[in-house]
Every structure is written in structure tokens, then in C-alpha cells.
Amino acid sequence: MVISIKNESMAKALELSDILRKSGLPVEVAVMGRSVSRALADADRRGVAYAVIVGPKELKEKQVVLREMKKCEQRIVDISNLAKEILAS
């Protein structure tokens, strides 16, 4: 699931979801305008394996936060390596 922190990050979230789909990953985008914590809770309830959190600060550095939902661990990853990071796990 791709979650945008701010509305101005939504275009990049949609772009990332397209890139991940082209890599063969099933992807949903949180578009309901919920807070990040509520979107993560929804993703967890639905059994989503990974959440990609897109924020303006990270985007400036061409990065996103990748959260492994089952382990409740997250790390910063470069956008260019995002699909590879998810597929490698």
C-alpha cells in the first residue's frame, strides 16, 4: 500500500504505485485522506505486507519510508531501489 503524507505528495504516490505494479507487485494507494496512522492500521487489518510512506521531506532526497507491516519495522529506501527492496524480502 502506498500512503501519501500530504496531498501534494499524492501525484508521486500514484507514480510510485505504477512503477511497483510494472514490477509485478499488487499495489493499492490510500486515497481517502486518512492520517498515516489510520491508513497503516487499515493496511494492517487487511493483511498488507508493506506500506510505502511518501512524504515531502523524503521526496526531496528521492527516498520513501518502507514499512514491513508484520515486523513493524521501517527504513528509508531510495525510490530507485524500492521495487527491488520489496521483492528481495
Image (cartoon, rainbow, N blue to C red):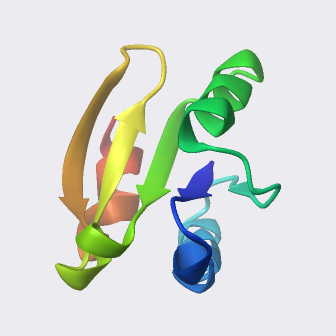
Quadrant in the picture for residue 14: bottom right
Residue drawn 78% across the image and 61% down it? 31
Foreground residue, 80 or 42?
42
Quadrant in the picture for residue 29: bottom right
Residue drawn 66% across the image and 32% down it? 38
The total of numbered circles placed on residues is 0
On the picture, is 70 further left or further right than 64? right
Q: Position of residue 49 (x, y in %)?
A: 55, 30
Q: Position of residue 73 (x, y in %)?
A: 29, 24
Q: Where is residue 27 in the image (x, y as percent from the top left)?
A: 68, 55
Q: Where is residue 47 in the image (x, y as percent from the top left)?
A: 69, 21
| Vertical side of 36 occupied by 25: above or below | below
Foreground residue, 53 or 38?
38
On the picture, is 36 further left or further right than 42? left
On the picture, is 27 further left or further right than 46? left
Quadrant showing the C terminus? top left
| Vertical side of 17 occupied by 30: above or below | above
Toward the right, the furthest residue is 32
Residue drawn 59% across the image and 56% down it? 2
| Vertical side of 68 occupied by 76: above or below | below
Residue drawn 40% across the image and 61% down it? 83
